[in-house]
Amino acid sequence: MENQIFTINIVGATDIYPNEPLDHVVVRISIVDQSTGNVIKKSLITENENEIPRKCMSPYETTEYISPVCTKTVSIDNVKRLAPYWDDSFIFNESVTTILKENIVVYFEIIDLDVPKDKHHQTPIAWAFLKPLASNGTYNIDHPCKLHLHYYPKNFNPQLQGTFVPVSKLLNNPSKFLAYLSVEIKTSETHELYDVTGRPKHFFHREVGSESIETLVYHEESAEEEIEKAEAEAPQIIRPANKNCKIPRLLKAQFPVGENGAHALCFNNNGDILVAAVKTGATYSIQFFSVNDIENSLALIRNAHHDIIYELTFSSDDKYLMSASADGDVKVWHGNGDSQQPVNTLPHPCNVYTAKFHPQDSRLVATGARDSLVRLWDRTKNSCTAELRGNVGTINSLVFSPDGKSMYAGDSTGIITVFNTDVTVEGTDGVSRKSVVKEDEIKNVPIVHLSMERSNFSLLVYTKDSMLRVFETKVMVPSQRYSGVVCNKFMMSGVFSPDCQYILAGSEDGTAKVWTVRKAELIPTAEWNFQFTTPLTAVAWNRVENMVAFSSFGPRMPIIVFCDPSPLPVVIEESDEVDQY
């Protein structure tokens, strides 16, 4: 914990009742030594044989104290009601042990920044406090906290007096009322510096303008060369459309990976590489395997993320691999694993559960996170180009249609948001929300996984009512249902076979199930006689070979691979577009 830093997340408050509309409401965060009432000093680091205070929020800081910070403002127009929602985060480049001391208190002050005509200070609304180290010795970190809000005394002046925080005088005689503030203090590893085009928000942001013109020109030319090269090369050929799949029933390999199995699996589109997200020590890595020599690791990207990796996905040409993690980063890697350094890093203020490349342009990336936002990125510039709204819960899964013209986002409340993502005409300016689907069948049922394969008209939806459904995308209603799995607690995965004739899914009982798409018949697979002791969270179906892979995230869990050695049969193809029904 000595080497970890911390983040403070402000979510929102329950109803408060102001006397008038409030236009610029913020939460001010102050980390205070309660014995003095002053904000605390930073820890010291050695630089050029001298001890100096750490840079906490910005590389240009000169103060020896951790300065108070404020959230973004929110406007409240309803005169008699206030339920503000900020969803703001602050990364402190300071050791978390600095705040895990007996006298340290974190104060959260809800303040309206407007100064009334009859006063000389901003308007205090309510305040709350949190002791990171509780009086019983437990830590109030790494879990959400619901804090009681307290009234300010009449005519209280909240203005800071140098390093002194006036609200600290109120701790011994608080005046509670029935409202709460939701916050969380989280530990994290230090981040790498990355460039931003806007104003830096924390220590690890580095303004692009701080680089020399020569460096900027070099990066721009390199990006243009990469784009030209990508456009000049044709994508790799995947399974021909006139080849049908068989259920793989021959055990090809069973081998342990990492310390706890693999939480995510993915075959590349060319069918010759399998990747797995594994835990190695205190960090999470990405392991590459050759399909031709499946038990021997091809490459290992060590320390890829500091927290669990939820999803792995390849670009359509297999040049890049993308990983989404609970550490708040989405990273793009070389698709063959030949480098330990990411090509791009896309930072987020919260957990990221899903990330996908656009099928027609691997420069465009979509990500889904805990804050209910779908973000579009120009990954060559590490730049977020748009934030798309429509969902109200955590975005658990994203998927593009095969033609790239639509994108679907499923969340923890059972809502599916559909976006127009046809970038061939207007580029990313043409991206827009088409519809918000609230199907009664899955109302308030978390969606854990979405999948599409060759058809633009069929969307596979896996939900926490132990059911998979195929939605017809023209009308966005379920046309078929598939039962037999257990899915109530964990993030599971389900996929179409490459020819769209079967559906494969993992189950919390440690088994894998497969159905026919048209008739929803559960197919007996006596050869799959394994059963993981922990939920089977990841399944993958090779797009070229008759091969499937399974994994579970638990102590000493293996990856299990089945194949079918017989040649793929050739049938007459009637249409380029697959109609599953």
Image (spheres, grey):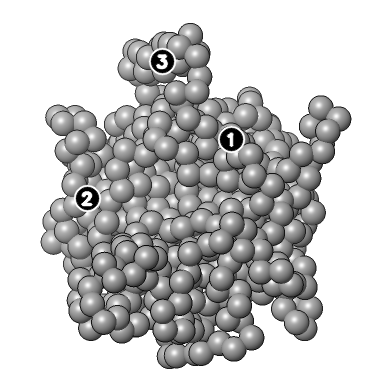
* Residue 188 falls left or right of residue 384: right
Alpha carbon distance from label 2 to label 3: 30 Å
User: Which amino acid lies under the numbered mark 3 shown in the image of this protein?
Assistant: Glu
Q: Which residue is mark 1?
A: 60
Alpha carbon distance from label 1 to label 2: 41 Å
Residue at horizontal 37 percent and vertical 14 percent from the top: 224
Label 2 residue SS: strand
Q: Dots 2 and 3: beta carbons under 8 Å? A: no
Foreground mark, 1 or 2? 1
Few, some or many residues within 10 Å of mark 3 (<14, 14–19, 20+): some
Residue at horizontal 22 percent and vertical 50 percent from the top: 419
Rendered location of residue 258, percent (x, y): 73, 50
Q: Which residue is mark 2?
A: 419
Foreground mark, 3 or 1? 1
The number of callouts visible is 3
Residue at horizontal 21 percent and vertical 65 percent from the top: 437
Task: Point out the tag, 1 or 2, that comes first from the N-terminus.
Answer: 1
Label 1 residue SS: loop
Q: Quadrant of residue 292?
A: top right
Few, some or many residues within 10 Å of mark 1 (<14, 14–19, 20+): few
User: Which amino acid lies under the numbered mark 2 shown in the image of this protein?
Assistant: Phe
Rendered location of residue 530, percent (x, y): 65, 64
